[in-house]
Amino acid sequence: MHLTYPAVLSALLFCTGLYGVLARRNAILVLMSVELMLNAVNLNLVAFDVWLSRAAEETLHSGQALTLFTIAIAAAEIGIGLAIVLAVYRNRGTSDIDKLRDTAEGPDSDGPDSDGRGTDGLDSEALAAQKAEATA
Amino acid sequence: MSLTAAAATVAHTATTAAGATVAHTATTAAGATTTAADAHGFLSPTGVEIAFLLVGLVTLGAAIVTVTTRQLVHAALWLVVALGGLAVEYLLLTAEFIAWVQVLIYVGSVVVLLLFGLMLTRAPIGRSPDADSGNRWAALTVAIASAAALVWVVVDAFRTTWIDLDGAAAGSTEVTGKALFQNWVLPFEALSVLLLAALVGAIVLSRKAKATPATASTPSGLSVSAARSAKAANTTPANETPATETAPNEMPATETPDSGTADNGTPAGATADPDKGGAL
């Protein structure tokens, strides 16, 4: 088999995942796109490992070992990511990443909103939200 | 150029060494580079290549539907098709163990976790108009530009590289196990520690609202209900932000014990933990 076929498929899958990460608004859909990108890398690793295991005299099968490690790390990443998304949803009532703008630089940003939640922080927050909506 | 294609077909049909040498001399006469991969042309694909191409088309189509559909649950189900297609590609590349690990981990647990996440964040069942953000065209431009660049570079670099798939499988369980437990033992053990850390981290992140005292957890519960009511009333996000901000100010007056029990009894935190633990 030509090495071009898996390499091109991997590149196209990676760019599909890239589009999903940039264009999606739901945090879980962004996580799905990250999974697509990781799988594209896995396909590349496997294809090059199969090629090199035949071309080279001695091989460590580093591509397949790295693929297994990537799969395990992706599983850990999806667990932690979903825990974070669920925590955010529990606190904010939304999993829309376009609305998570607390660390965005406003006109007069005064630190995180945990200490600015009083009556003073309400006006600046609303102002920041309006500015964010206007610029978006 | 037709001479090269004809020589390639000769090399495919003839299994003797004489046919290969004929193709080799023919490509040399045609002026191409004289590597061993020149005997295999793109115009006469083998059966494995045709199967790889078809499964690759299905995989790419499923991936594109995954990132473009507006129905969130359908996106997760199309992701199953894409990941399963990738498992078939691994099988075609004779990496059997990776293929079954892919089926077990991705199709078995990751997609199930994603579906649970969609359910626990109350994803809408039908079409959701706000699945894509406003910078979709910028994202499309970036994706197409990077795809063109990557495909061009990859095809230009590996146009003549040939994977020899004959003989023993390069990724059978025996080969992969030997490589993993002879040369990669230390990273393997480090990875197990990392998985343990991720498991503990997921549990800690999921239980933070229950572990903190009621004064910290009640505003979150109230803001969730306020945001939900705001979402149900179809208000714009500009109206929703003050609603969540005014919620803590009303909190200490009436609702403290009620919202505290409601927050403790939220099914999101209670059911998220065993699923996450089981999948990890």
Image (tube, rainbow, N blue to C red):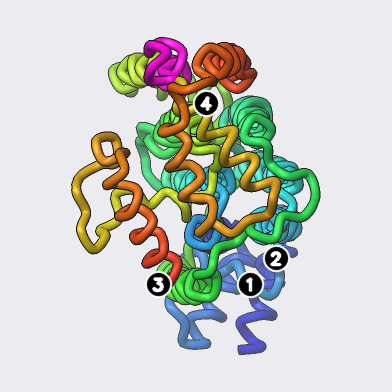
At numbered mark 1, what does the secondary structure look like: helix, strand or loop?
A: loop
Quadrant position of the N terminus of chain B in the picture: bottom right
Provide the chain ID for the residue under circle 3: A
Amino acid under disc 1: Phe
Of circles 4 and 1, the one toward us is 4
Cα distance, mark 3 to mark 2?
52 Å
> What residue is rendered at 20% in x and 45% in y?
A111
Same chain for the residues at labels 1 and 2, yes or no?
A: yes
Residue kind at label 3, given as amino acid type:
Thr
Q: Amino acid at mark 4?
A: Gly
The disc label shown at residue A135, or none = 3
**Which contiguous range is marked in magenta?**
B203-217
Q: Residue B42: which numbered mark, if any? A: 1
Q: Is residue B107 left or right of residue A63?
A: right
Q: Are marks 3 and 2 in contact (CB under 8 Å)?
A: no
* B210 part of magenta stretch: yes
- Please, which chain is the residue tagged with disc 2 on? B
Which numbered disc, 3 or 1, marks the residue closer to the eye?
Answer: 3
Q: Amino acid at mark 2?
A: Pro
Pointer 3 and pointer 4: residues touching (CB < 8 Å)? no
How many residues crowd around disc 3 within 10 Å: few (fewer than 14), some, or many (20 or more)?
A: few
- Write down the chain letter for disc 1: B
Measuring from the top left, give residue B213's x and y in whole percent.
38, 11
Residue at mark 4 to residue at mark 1: CA–CA distance: 61 Å
Q: Which residue is mark 2?
A: B45
User: On screen, A75 above or below B174?
Assistant: below
Q: Distance from label 3 to label 4 (Cα)?
A: 30 Å
